[in-house]
Structures are given as C-alpha cells and as structure tokens.
Image (tube, rainbow, N blue to C red):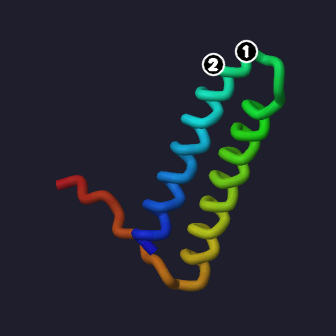
Amino acid sequence: MKIFVGIAFTLIIASLASALFFLMRDKGRSNRTVQALAMRVGLSVTLFLIVLGAYKLGWIQPTGISMR
C-alpha cells in the first residue's frame, strides 16, 4: 500500500508540473493546463477514496500520534 500511495503522489506532482509547463508554454491559447489540473484533482480524489476504502476493509490501520 505504501508503494501505491508513493506512486500516486508522484503522479499527482507530475500532473501539477505538467500543468505549470503548459501554462508557461501555451500562454492560455489551449486547454491543456485545465486538463492537467483536472487530472490532478481526479487522481487526488481517487487516492483519497482508495485509502478510505482500504481502511474500511481493514487493509490499513491507523497508528495514531504518540504525545509523550
């Protein structure tokens, strides 16, 4: 699960970087920036739902924060 989350975060950051690249290169003449940002939002929501589902199925457990 840790590897999956790491890969998902990498894809989210890559999508954000590609949106910045398209923003600088296209200067608002195309909608590639909007598509890249929409993909980032979709990946983030999907990751959240998968983590929530994994918790509900018992695949992952919360560890809590030790306040000692």
The disc labelled 1 sits on which kind of residue?
Answer: Lys
Residue under label 2, please give it: 24
**Which residue lies most toward the left here?**
68
**Which residue lies most toward the right here?**
30
2 vs 65: above or below: below
Left or right: residue 17 compared with residue 37: left
Q: Name the residue located 48 percent from the left edge and 52 percent from the top edge.
A: 10
Pointer 2 and pointer 1: residues touching (CB < 8 Å)? yes
56 vs 46: above or below: below
Q: Which of 66 and 37 is in front in this view?
A: 37
Q: Name the secondary structure under disc 1.
A: loop
48 vs 31: above or below: below
- Neighbour class for label 1 at 10 Å: few (<14), some, many (≥20)? few
40 vs 54: above or below: above
Across and down, in percent, residue 4 comes to 48, 69
**Spatial distance from mark 2 to mark 1, Cα to Cα?**
6 Å
Residue under label 1, please give it: 27
Q: Name the residue located 70 percent from the left edge and 37 percent from the top edge.
A: 37
Left or right: residue 1 compared with residue 63: right
Left or right: residue 41 compared with residue 55: right
Q: Quadrant of residue 1?
A: bottom left
The disc labelled 2 sits on which kind of residue?
Answer: Met
Across and down, in percent, residue 40 comes to 66, 45
